[in-house]
Image (cartoon, rainbow, N blue to C red):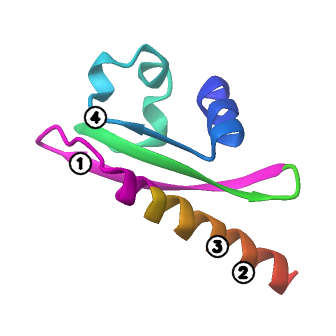
């Protein structure tokens, strides 16, 4: 899980169309539901710390995530991070 979290903190998000074929995600199965075939993970970050994740999953069929979907999930994570910061 640490490698996945590190990648997310560096890239902002991680989108994979086939979780079963991704060696890194296979070590981090606890981050998403059983039966997940495709996933987007976006970090909710404040300053230099990762506060949480926004996770979008496809269960059943494989899904090729569009750049717009990845951007949307990243925007949701950024909005959450801003909300956390302003309420502290």
| Label 3 Cα neighbours within 10 Å, binned few <14 / some 14-19 / many ≥20 | many
Residue 10 has which mark?
A: none
* SS at mark 2 in the image: helix
| Label 4 Cα neighbours within 10 Å, binned few <14 / some 14-19 / many ≥20 | some
Instruction: Identify the image quadrant of the C terminus.
Output: bottom right
- Residue 86 left/right relative to 45: right
The Cα–Cα distance between marks 2 and 4, rounded to whole angstroms, is 30 Å
The residue identified by callout 3 is 80
The residue identified by callout 4 is 17
The span picked out in magenta is: 49-70
Q: Is residue 57 visible?
A: yes
Identity of the residue drawn at 49% across and 47% down: 41
The Cα–Cα distance between marks 2 and 1, rounded to whole angstroms, is 27 Å
User: Most extreme residue toward the left, as rendered?
Assistant: 61
In which quarter of the view is residue 56 placed?
Answer: bottom left
Q: Of the residues under marks 2 and 1, which one precedes in the sequence? A: 1
Q: Are marks 3 and 2 in contact (CB under 8 Å)?
A: yes
Q: Tell me if residue 66 is in the magenta stretch.
A: yes
User: Most extreme residue toward the bottom, as rendered?
Assistant: 87
Q: Is residue 34 visible?
A: no
Q: Of the residues under marks 3 and 1, which one precedes in the sequence? A: 1
Residue 58 has which mark?
A: 1
- Residue 34 left/right relative to 82: left
| Label 1 Cα neighbours within 10 Å, binned few <14 / some 14-19 / many ≥20 | some
């Amino acid at each position: 899980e640490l490698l996945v979290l590190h990648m997310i903190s560096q890239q902002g998000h991680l989108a994979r169309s086939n979780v079963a074929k991704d060696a890194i995600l296979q070590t981090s199965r606890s981050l998403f539901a059983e039966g997940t075939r495709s996933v987007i993970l976006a970090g909710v970050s404040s300053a230099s710390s990762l506060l949480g994740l926004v996770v979008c999953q496809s269960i059943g069929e494989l899904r090729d995530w569009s750049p717009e979907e990845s951007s949307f999930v990243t925007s949701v994570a950024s909005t959450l991070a801003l909300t956390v910061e302003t309420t502290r």
